[in-house]
Image: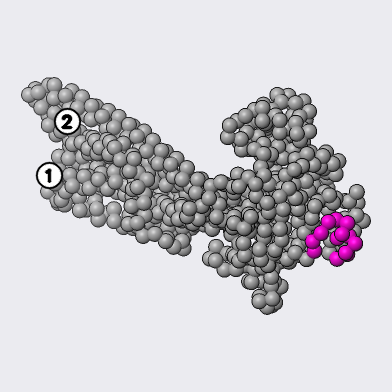
Amino acid sequence: MWWDDHHSEEGYIRRLGVGEMLSRIAVRLRPELPQLGLGILLMLVAVAAELAGPLIIRQIIDQDIPNAIDGADQGAIFRSAALFLAVFLVGSAATYVQILIVAKVGLRTIARLKQDLFDHLLHLGMDYFDHHPPGRIMTRVESDTERLQNLFSEVSLALIRTVILLAGTFTIMLKTDVRITLAVIGLMIPFFIGALIFLRAMRKLYKKVRQVYADLATFVAEYVQGVPILQVYGRREWALKRLGQRNQARYRREVGTEFIDYGFWATFGTLEVLSVMLILYLGFSDRFGGALTLGTAVLFVEYTRRAFWPLVQFTEQLGFIQKAFASADRVFGILDTESSVKNRDGARTDIPSDWQEIRFENVRFGYKSPEGRDLTTEGRTVPVKAGSTEVRPVAAEGEASGAIAKAIDGVSFTIRRGERIALVGPSGGGKSTLVGLFLRFYEQDEGRITLDGVDIREYSLQAWRSSLGLVLQDIHLFPGTIAENLEVFLPQHDREQLQGTIRKLGAGDIFERLPQGLETELSEGGHNLSMGERQLLCFARALVRDPQILVLDEATSSVDPATEHRIQDSLERAMRGRTSVIVAHRLSTIVGADRILVLQNGQVVQEGRHEELLKEGGLYAVLYRLQFEAGDVA
């Protein structure tokens, strides 16, 4: 795909050697060995049939036709013709069945590989996704694995077939006439070397073509998203002019490249004509003995034609295998990536139902690069949560790195059972990072988060997260119906429990008035629901399994105040008697919290109830006053 061109094989250094890579590929192919063996056998049958064709034609021309003319054997021509037809049909059938078998082998192998990749990605910590954007991951899961599928199902056997076919072709030609065969090979060598040089040059040209196409696709995508702006400001002609310029650039680049490509191969095609001329000259010229029979001349012509394009394909197949090895290396690189968050040996599988408090004890955390460097000490910006566009400036240029705080720097506080805790503060203060540590999306560098004195890392990830309900600022709904989205976290698919959760939220009337109720099919992203309905659906999905702890990460910041008021009523019901941790931008949503923690630069700078913090002054009072003056606080 076009976005993979930015990660081209040119200059790519593989981590794995060829031997190790082949052994790992072989492990994936092991369940398919019987089918693969049958495919190889059918390929050999097809090659044998292809090699036999010219021999039968020579038999017909040099022996059967003269015998028929002399009256010695009138039926020989028909028997040989029938044999030729039978060989052709057997070869074609073997090729057809071989292609089907090997295609199935490739599809099944890659399906297993994609399943393993997807499963592995689901177990990785969020730091991996911080450094690998979705487009690149999709390239690995789709483009690289598809290239491997072609390697498994087409190219590898095609390469073997080409080698065997060429070996068989030149062996028969050498046994028939060494002199003519060597002359034909001598003619092919310079053309073959020229093709190698040309193909290398064309790869660079086509890379530029793909880059121009990528620029054009990016331009169209960005301007389609901006259609309302273009229409309001009457900039349609301006946009069309800029699109026309890019179309012209693509046209000039692509036409020029195609002209060179087709021109070369048209010239290269003369090799076949020159080879035929050479065979006829050497075979029938008195200067060279002129002893070649007509049937043998036809045999040489046929074999030369059949050797011509396999030689060209051979170079392309080798190039593709190199690319496939690079793809395999990248795919296995993902599979070899260890999650930064994983279960400890002997991890506990049950969370006590009567726990009393959660403690953050001197917790410190800094985002790191893929190489393990601490980005909070390198004068760069770091994401404050996976997939977010929000970043925190870490150091100004020229500023001493030692003076820069961690993303979370020595945070300590307690959450008592049933308490409603709110985390507030300016963007980049560490609120979402703290939640990410609590959810075990990341592992802290120092300190502990404990449940009644037991480090939460002593519990298995599944056990710990099963006690949590999460609602994020960014709404994500899965394809399917409303019910399927709600049941995704309800293993028993208990429809009565599901409907009870909706009623507790006070959202029953909303979903009941939809065309098919809970069976309403969601459009892409759930856009056939209003923003408030989508948000309520996310709340219901988080509560459907009755979690002990509810985490809301700016869960109402994307809705309007009127919708937010309706959602707040639902939230009050949802949080009643439940431990809740709320990250809030709109301070009006957390004035009733039992305790508010104000974070700045990764540290807790204030703590208390809403009224206490207002009286105290400080950062909370400033933030509240700013929102009140902006009309965001009722």
Are circles 1 and 2 on residues that touch, CB within 8 Å?
A: no
| Residue at x 34% of width, y 40% of height | 31
- Residue situated in front as seen by the camera: 573 or 7: 573
Please state which amino acid type lies under the numbered disc 2: Ile
Query: Which numbered circle lies on residue 419?
Result: none
Residue 403 can be seen, yes or no: yes
Number of other residues with Cα within 10 Å of mark 1, as a class: few under 14, some 14 to 19, many 20 or more? few
- Residue situated in front as seen by the camera: 290 or 418: 418
Please state which amino acid type lies under the numbered disc 1: Ala
Nearer to us of marks 1 and 2 is 2
| Residue designated by label 1 | 291
- Residue situated in front as seen by the camera: 550 or 588: 550
Reply yes or no: does residue 616 show up in magenta: yes
| Residue at x 46% of width, y 61% of height | 12
Reply yes or no: does residue 512 show up in magenta: no
Number of other residues with Cα within 10 Å of mark 2, as a class: few under 14, some 14 to 19, many 20 or more? many
Determine the main secondary structure of the stretch shown in magenta: helix
| Residue at x 85% of width, y 56% of height | 610
Q: Which residues are magenta?
A: 606-618
Distance from the alpha carbon under mark 1 to that under mark 2: 18 Å
Element type where label 1 sits in the image: loop
- In primary-sequence order, the first of circles 1 and 2 is 2
Element type where label 2 sits in the image: helix
Residue 205 can be seen, yes or no: no
| Residue designated by label 2 | 60
